[in-house]
Image (cartoon, helix red, strand yellow):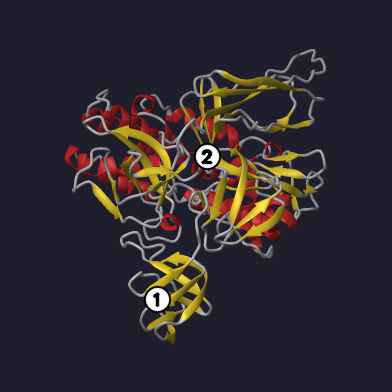
Amino acid sequence: MTRKITIAGLALILFGGVISPSVVHADSTGTTDNATATTTKASDPAETTIKVGSIGMPYTVVSDKDGNTNYYTYPNAPTVLTAAEINNDDYMKELATNIPNMTIDQSALQQMLKTPITLDLNESYLDYMYDAYGAAEGLTKDGMLDGLTLQPYAVAWLASHVAQKNKGKITFDQLQSDYQNSLRKKLVASPVGAGLLSLTDKMFQSEDIYDTVGGTLYDSLLINTPLSNYSDDKLATLDPDASYRQMASLISKPMSNYYIKQADGTYQMSGLLISGIQAYSFWFEEKPSIPDPTPTPSASQPVTVHYVDDQGNTLKPDKTLTGKLGDSYKTEPLDIDGYGLTNTTGDETGTFGSTAKSVTYTYAPVITSGGDGDTIAPEGTVIYATKKIGLYKHATFTNKARKQWYAKKARINRPMFVVTGYAKSKNGVKRYQVKDVNHHSKTNGKTGYVTANAKYTSRVYYATKHKTITVINPKGVNAYSKKTLTNKKAHYKQGQVLKVKKIVNQNLTTRFVLSNGRYITANKMLVQSGKQTMPKRVQTKTALNRYSTANLTKQNKHVSAHAVLKVTGWTYSNANNFSKSDTLRYQVAGGYITGKKQLVRVFK
């Protein structure tokens, strides 16, 4: 897995996706050459064999004078997956359902837990990567350093300079001159810079070409990084040299920084390692370690945990963690009624040191006092379209700017989007900046702008309690003993009506707590408020066919007129085709039949 991430970094895959932070295609057999290479060095007395017991979710670091902010690739997911969670099939399936854009290979994670790792924890990440893979790829250590730091530098340079041009702080001639004197020189000198050089040379060839392709490339670049969270005013101050220095600092740190020993003797693999170590900086200064000529033993300093809203107001009292120097610590966000976690600043796991540390959990309001949460959705939450909508290149909607139509669909098939930002049209109309997260659709991954009008888009998760809910997912839903949706207790079929005691937050999602104390998802595509009456039987008004699929393909039986059939469920056609509307189908023994009222009579 690490090798694939590194080679991706060296290839500078900047547009259409920076480094994929997901453990998507990691080898799950444990028999690769690389796995052998990392476990055949046991003769080195400095090395030790460790067992991974938990794995951090991937994140990217963005720093400024106030410190580091960790931007998680999947902000709605837990920040750490434990061994119990990774080995729980139901939990991982539910996680994938609740976070549609998450593409993590469960079997790869299980293999990482199963296979011990042999390495020198005092060796730097750079040395480790070079020893394991750099020499085999024909790189020098300087070449490895160059490959790991050039990408963040290039992204930061492009983001800051294009933002300055957008805000009128520099002219195109200045932009072109800066490119020739800084970024281009680095790309030309780098053995891995050629992949981007042809793109940037074309982009800055002339102002006409820049005006034509620059904006598209810029948007494509930002949407795949945490930099999409910042305005042009802020991005204009992004420092590519500081980004380089921070990257150099991170990859020079020992592997013990990324494999953190836990109380049970296992190690937690850092999410920063999973993401291939990515960092951007508005300001960074490495604080040198100056030896004291008469050193005294260092005393352990505390870790203070803050819980605040997006305005900096305290939501819960601070917590102070203490321990012996070198002992490990772990912080966790609290569940705060009415709020969902949106950002984490500081290191959630680490060791107690001689300097004080702090971790800040920032929340935004999630549960509102009325309706089903049709207020503006917080960044990182998922919305869906309730009517036909368009996806546009710009916040001002025009036919020319339209990228995709999404047809009006039945509730269980509605197209979903993750909110990545906000904008207004030229007339001041609010828009969502979004990413399409419909996995099985051809539109998956598309980015752009959609309406924020509550008549057309709504949040996918319920925000208020309902007395009863009905399971509408054709595959049913599971109930769990914990709100993290672990420890499965029951399965409820489509059509079952359940009593609800309350609703609770889980990061930026919500859960219903049933009257029996169990937790189920509050995803509107899986459950619906109130009692929804399910048809029990249908009678054919005329002869019709039964099919193997909901799209009525693969005919498997001819049904005569006036036949009475038991209904076992319902669904809709064209589930993953958003250019077409969908049509009701009834599931009966042996397959599916049409749900058209002209052809069948329903008995409830």
Please tell me the numbered disc located at residue 278.
2
Provide residue 230's location: percent of width, then percent of height. Answer: 40, 30
Q: Is residue 519 left or right of residue 327?
A: left
Please tell me the numbered disc located at residue 438.
none
First reached walking from the N terminus: tag 1 or tag 2: 2
Along the line of sight, the residue nearer the viewer: 112 or 392: 392
Q: Note whether residue 592 is visible.
A: yes
Provide residue 524's location: percent of width, then percent of height. Answer: 49, 49
Along the line of sight, the residue nearer the viewer: 561 or 568: 561
Q: Which residue is mark 1?
A: 552
In the image, residue 288 sits, relative to residue 95, either above or below, namely above
Residue shown at the point (58%, 38%) measured from the top left: 507
Provide residue 87's location: percent of width, then percent of height. Answer: 70, 56
Quarter holding the N terminus? bottom right
Residue shown at the point (62%, 48%) measured from the top left: 499
**Quarter assignment of residue 155:** top left
Provide residue 373's location: percent of width, then percent of height. Answer: 45, 37
In the image, residue 577 sits, relative to residue 70, either above or below, namely below
In the rendered structure, which amino acid carries the disc numbered 2?
A: Gln
Label 1: how many residues lie within 10 Å, few (<14), some (14-19) or many (20+)?
Answer: some
Q: Is residue 270 left or right of residue 426?
A: right
Task: Tell me the element at label 2.
Answer: loop
Q: Is residue 535 left or right of residue 124?
A: left
Q: Are marks 1 and 2 in contact (CB under 8 Å)?
A: no
Residue shown at the point (81%, 52%) measured from the top left: 43
Task: Tell me the element at label 1.
Answer: loop
Q: Is residue 49 left or right of residue 179?
A: right
Furthest residue in direction left, as rendered: 208
